[in-house]
Image (cartoon, rainbow, N blue to C red):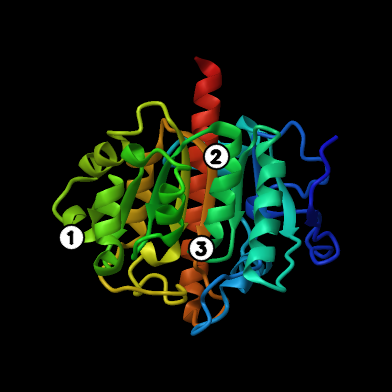
Amino acid sequence: MVKCPFKLNFDDLRDLGPTGFLETPMVDDINGYDILFAALPYECDETAKPGSRKGSAYFRRDIFGFGFCDQGLDINMAHSVKSGDCGDLIIDDSSKAAAEKCIYTAKKAIASTGACSFMIGGDDKTSYGQIKACYEKYGKMAVIHFGGSVSSALVRVAEEDMCDNASSLEVGIRNGMSQYGGRLEKLGIDVLTASDMDYMKFSDVGSAIKKNVSGKPVFVIFDMNFYDPAFVTSAARPYAGGFASHEVVEIMETGLVGLDIKGISVCGMLDYNDPGETSLNNLAECAGKLYAVAAYNIASEREL
């Protein structure tokens, strides 16, 4: 039995029953699962606007009814794959290095079981330890980052030779090219900017995302600032010129269906500045669609 290095939230959820992210059961023994969720209550660098460490708790507390099925992909995830929620990562926040080690250790425990690891919370930089753990299990992966600004985690793992640069991609970028553009070009990582995508059909966006993956294992980073601030007001680092709710769903369906997704990180969500809970509902829609895509891909592979 592989014990889970997390803090289970049964007490916190006692009024709701033992239900985790997207209606999955809370689990202790993490063996034998296809997809395992976990909350990441930590942020590396959102010091000017703190709160992304609390985004996962906001999601747990206030979202119900998402996760059983997906109409677009015509799949009931509860019946198609075995999924569970490990709870919250136990984080030593005495230093960034200590916290990063905790994230890496937890992700490595999930990866060791062969399950697709799905972490919600934190910021872009917390994805580094997650990718490192998956790299040690699966080798170099294609890292696909959806976000408003260049992913420092992707740049770091690329420079440390832990991802397949030619298969990796920045999607939806509106900021950060002045800082990271030269490094991305030198590393051979393609960039699909938001302005590029404005003139493309969804099917063409999907083809652009998939074109270089060619059977590689995939790690997906989804920063909530991929959305336009009109749809997600509580993104930790919002950038204008992003995407609407229906566009995000279409991009995921056309770009990620059929890929061998080994890990997912949904990050960059605050627990405040959310009038009408628009951000919260878009987080639920986004995480639910990523869950559906991962489940669809696993179920489809089994049928081959």
Q: Which tag is nearer the camera, tag 1 or tag 3?
A: 3
| Residue type, label 3 | Lys
Give yes or no for contact between labels 3 and 2 (Cβ–Cβ under 8 Å): no
Element class at badge 3 = helix
Quote the CA–CA distance across marks 2 and 1.
Answer: 31 Å
Horizontally, is 4 left or right of 134 in the view?
A: right
What residue type is disc 2 on? Tyr
Q: Which numbered disc, 1 or 3, marks the residue that appears first in the sequence?
A: 3
Amino acid type for the residue under numbered disc 1: Ser
Residue sitting nearer the eye, 304 or 236? 236
Q: Residue at x 42, y 53 (%)?
A: 154
Vertical relation: 287 (above or below) 282: above
**Residue 209 screen position, x and y as percent:** 30, 41
Q: Which residue is mark 3?
A: 125
Q: Does 123 appear above or below 69?
A: below
Q: Residue 195, which numbered label?
A: 1
Point 24% across, 51% down: residue: 185
Q: Quadrant of residue 82?
A: top right
